[in-house]
Image: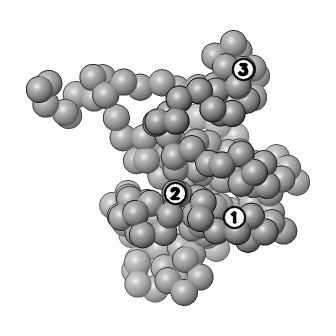
Amino acid sequence: SGKSTGGVVEDLFYLRKQHPEKRLPIAPSEPCRGRVIAVDFVNGIDKIILPQFAQWTPKSMLIHGSWVQSYDKAHRTLNFANGSFVEFMSYDQDLDKFAGTSRHFIHFDEEPPNPIYTENWARVVDTGGHMWLTMTPVEGMTWVYDTIYEPGILGAEDIDVIVVDMTENPYLDEG
């Protein structure tokens, strides 16, 4: 149902500092600082997230309209013409790698380990930033169910839960 695609498009709304539905926690003069975290670099970032960014990022958002000039492979950071950036990280990094920086958004692609989620939550506190998870609950009812899903379904003001079934995707063959 395109959960990673939806997450990347949400990332891009923040990075361009214009959202069709919500007020963003970014001052007009300030660049957006984002982070996307996936299961690992090879399969999660390189094979899923980066191709999604390459597909959905308008060239006008890139430095000189160029992916090559915008993506810093050594630092795993995509820089934008407006000064915004998104860094790419993975769940297989040590917990201390997630500390010490302020971000406007954090996007978790697939379910994060609870300590990584908690450490990243601290990264958006000072900006009033937002976090979102794009995931399939393959592990069943974990901490995400108790901490995020159930409160969101029961109406918590600061949690939106969107559930999509693959049968709702009109682009998949019924078979």
Q: Label 1, on which residue? A: 33
Q: In this rendering, which labeled residue sits more in front, label 2 or label 1?
A: 2
- Mark 3–mark 1 Cα distance, whole angstroms, equals 28 Å
Answer with mark 2 or mark 3, whichever residue precedes in sequence.
2
Answer with mark 3 or mark 1, whichever residue precedes in sequence.
1
Nearer to the camera, 70 or 37: 37
Q: Residues within 10 Å of mark 2 (few under 14, many from 20)?
A: some
Q: Label 3, on which residue? A: 151
Residue type at tag 3:
Pro
x then y, percent, for residue 51: 35, 64
Q: Is residue 75 above or below residue 8?
A: below
Residue type at tag 2:
Val
- Mark 2–mark 3 Cα distance, whole angstroms, equals 25 Å
Residue at 41 percent across and 84 percent down: it is 68
Label tally: 3
Q: Is residue 9 above or below residue 157?
A: below
The kind of secondary structure element at disc 3 is helix
The kind of secondary structure element at disc 2 is loop
- Mark 2–mark 1 Cα distance, whole angstroms, equals 21 Å
Indicate left or right for 84 with 56 as reference. Answer: right
x then y, percent, for residue 120: 75, 54
Q: In this rendering, which labeled residue sits more in front, label 2 or label 3?
A: 2
Q: Label 2, on which residue? A: 39
Q: Is residue 104 above or below residue 66?
A: above
Q: What's the coloring here?
A: one colour
